């Protein structure tokens, strides 16, 4: 029996059939683990067979109709700006009758299972079900937030913070398992993220904050912080927020920018050197982040001191 073909990397699959490149890709540390991409796809036919990841799609622009096919037979035909579609790794084909702007989030089935097990063990073998051009207010808010983040990373060679990607994976997979999966009813009820959680204990919080402030220049991962608190990653995110009022990534970002402001005021380090000293992996990303949060560039901030 012939060995089955290796899964096709999602962006490569789309490139092959759409004959276009993404506007940008957002990757994790080290250039690996592509998380998201923005595309302007022309009219095209894209069969999704043996994809490496499930694809969560947001219809961001263009009013063309999109046709869903199975074994060459049309099973859906819709056009809805702002809608969401989830495409599993196999079994469907897609016909774009015109150009369309889309944001994709790529979900590795292995990572989905790992996170599902940490969030709710009863959901670990669940599958995210396919859906086509639905309206989901939570996903709409998620993609609005994600799009604003992507535009910043677009100017930073597409490399995202590990802590940010870890958080995004968890909140997204929790929502998809809760509302769009085969998880048992009791497991789905337990996945409701609105349930109250105890704030992180003071001693654990102190360990985490000391670690963060000592390693601002490093790429800090969600797993590292959760281990310091002796909690699962999902429980850590919610307990940290309950204790501080912000997510771990927002706290890290604020700490980096506060340190950057101090270095810009009190040293003669160049702007790129300041950015590198507080964990921004490129001068472009540092400047974009600084301007996004403070409303001015690092150089303008320094001149105003």
Image (spheres, grey):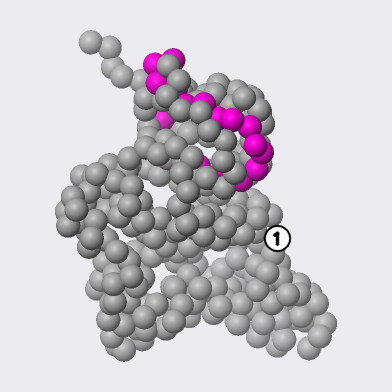
Residue 265 lies in the magenta-colored region: no
Q: Is residue 62 above or below residue 6?
A: below
Q: Is residue 49 above or below residue 272?
A: above
Q: Which residue is mark 1?
A: 284
Q: Residue at x 28, y 85 (%)?
A: 201
Residue found farthest to the top: 1
Question: Looking at the picture, how far across and down is residue 112, in whole percent?
Answer: 32, 48
Residue 95 located left or right of residue 41: left
Residue found farthest to the right: 303
Question: Looking at the picture, how far across and down is residue 58, in whole percent?
Answer: 53, 45
Q: Secondary structure at mark 1?
A: helix
- Residue bounds of the magenta highlight: 51-72
Where is residue 160, by image quadrant?
bottom right
Q: Residue at x 66, y 28 (%)?
A: 98
Q: Residue at x 65, y 37 (%)?
A: 63
Question: Looking at the picture, how far across and down is residue 8, in whole percent?
Answer: 43, 28
The one nearer the camera, 211 or 296, is 296
Q: Is residue 90 above or below residue 249?
A: above
Question: Looking at the picture, how far across and down is residue 146, in whole percent?
Answer: 55, 57
Q: Residue at x 65, y 74 (%)?
A: 293
């Amino acid at each position: 029996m012939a060995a089955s073909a290796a899964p096709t990397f999602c962006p490569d699959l789309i490139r092959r059939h759409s004959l276009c490149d993404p506007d940008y890709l957002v990757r994790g540390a080290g250039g690996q683990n592509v998380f998201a991409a923005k595309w302007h796809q022309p009219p095209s036919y894209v069969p999704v067979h043996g994809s490496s990841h499930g694809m969560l799609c947001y219809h961001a622009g263009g009013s063309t109709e999109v046709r869903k096919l199975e074994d060459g037979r049309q099973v859906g035909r819709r056009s809805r700006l702002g809608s969401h579609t989830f495409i599993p790794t196999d079994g469907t084909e897609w016909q774009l009758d015109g150009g369309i702007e889309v944001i994709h989030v790529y979900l590795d089935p292995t990572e989905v299972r790992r996170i599902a097990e940490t969030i709710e063990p009863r959901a670990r073998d669940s599958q995210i079900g396919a859906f086509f051009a639905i309206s989901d207010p939570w996903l709409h808010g998620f993609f609005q937030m994600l799009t604003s983040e992507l535009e910043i990373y677009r100017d930073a060679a597409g490399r995202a913070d590990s802590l940010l990607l870890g958080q995004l994976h968890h909140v997204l997979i929790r929502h998809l398992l809760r509302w769009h999966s085969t998880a048992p009813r009791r497991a789905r009820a337990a996945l409701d993220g609105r349930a109250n959680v105890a704030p992180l204990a003071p001693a654990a919080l102190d360990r985490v904050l000391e670690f963060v402030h000592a390693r601002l220049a490093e790429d800090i991962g969600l797993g590292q912080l959760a281990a310091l608190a002796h909690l699962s990653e999902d429980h850590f995110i919610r307990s940290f927020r309950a204790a501080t009022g912000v997510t771990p990534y927002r706290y890290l970002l604020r700490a980096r920018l506060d340190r950057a402001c101090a270095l810009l005021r009190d040293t003669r380090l160049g702007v790129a050197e300041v950015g590198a000293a507080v964990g921004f992996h490129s001068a472009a990303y540092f400047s974009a982040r600084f301007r996004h949060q403070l409303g001015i560039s690092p150089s303008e901030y320094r001149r105003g001191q």
